[in-house]
Image (cartoon, grey):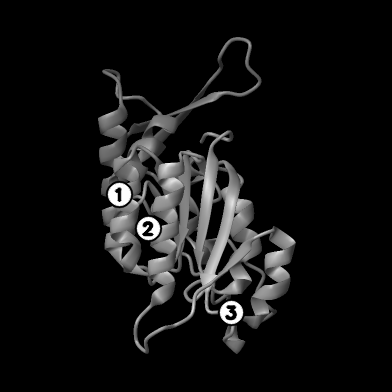
Amino acid sequence: MNKDMKLAVLIDGDNIPSKYVKEMMEELAKYGTPTIKRIYGDWTKPQLSKWKSILLEHAINPIQQYSYTSGKNATDSAMIIDAMDILYSEKVNGFCLASSDSDFTKLATRIREAGLTVYGIGEKKTPDPFIVACDKFIYLEILQPNTPKKGEESKDRKVDKISPKLIRLLKNSVKDAAGEDGWAFLGDVGSLILKKQPNFDSRNFGFDKLTPLFQSLKEFEIEQRDQSNARFKLIFVRNR
């Protein structure tokens, strides 16, 4: 993660629920500094009125886009045109495209072709083509605190099951990143997993970090190694 990365955050207001914005902006702070923050929609529509206080709180600039034709999404077109203008301005190092709409697949691909990083954020209903077009894709559902009322199950934070497919992904990534002794630095493993599957996130499976996810699985061996003149240990993993 490059905390000095300048990010352009472009939000599809017709597609992203306002309840996620606070957590979304906090998440993006982990990856860089949002220097451009814009949200697109037809602000004459009553259903977008709930955004007003949120936009002021997070200094997000609303871009008005009228729906010229019924059934056509003018918001997508405006967001794509702005993204290309920002790309050519060379004012940012990366983009965050917040939408669950596959219409932004080609945009994400074009930005990455220019050598910039693309973070995608959307709901779990997001189509796969848009997900794999991003360097990393984050599901909105995992960002909200899991605090259901007594006797209720959280509807937003449904934890995915650890499937044989996931185990294969983890084992193959450890093998690919490992040295001759079979041990792999966990940071390298995590980067490799994201290249293979951009929507991978340990939080999808109920773990805040990658290390406890690996520690919970009997298929892997974990080792902490001291490094000189450092306050933290390096974590290595090996297939059993």
Instruction: Say what secondary structure mark 2 lies in.
Output: loop
**Foreground: 53 or 191?**
53
- 3D distance between C-alphas at marks 1 and 3: 28 Å
Q: Residues within 10 Å of mark 3 (few under 14, many from 20)?
A: some
**Foreground: 39 or 1?**
39
Taking the image as shown, residue 195 lies to the left or right of residue 34, namely left
Q: Which mark is residue 102?
A: none
Instruction: Say what secondary structure mark 3 lies in.
Output: loop
Taking the image as shown, residue 118 lies to the left or right of residue 206, namely left
User: Can you give x and y, in whole percent of width and height, for residue 66 in the image?
Assistant: 48, 80
Mark before the other along the chain sequence, 1 or 3: 3
Residue 175 against residue 14 in the figure, above or below: above
**Which residue is tagged 1?**
110
- 3D distance between C-alphas at marks 3 and 2: 42 Å
User: Can you give x and y, in whole percent of width and height, for residue 220 in the image?
Assistant: 37, 38
The type of residue carrying mark 2 is: Ile
**Residue pictured at 30% horizontal, 24% vertical:** 182
The type of residue carrying mark 3 is: Trp
Q: Nearer the viewer, mark 2 or mark 1?
A: 1
- 3D distance between C-alphas at marks 2 and 1: 33 Å
Taking the image as shown, residue 110 lies to the left or right of residue 52, namely left
**Which residue is tagged 2?**
162
Q: Residues within 10 Å of mark 1 (few under 14, many from 20)?
A: some
Instruction: Say what secondary structure mark 1 lies in.
Output: helix
User: Can you give x and y, in whole percent of width and height, for residue 116 in the image?
Assistant: 39, 40
Q: Are marks 1 and 3 in contact (CB under 8 Å)?
A: no
Mark before the other along the chain sequence, 2 or 1: 1
Q: Quadrant of the C terminus?
A: top left
| Label total for image | 3
Q: Nearer the viewer, mark 1 or mark 3?
A: 3
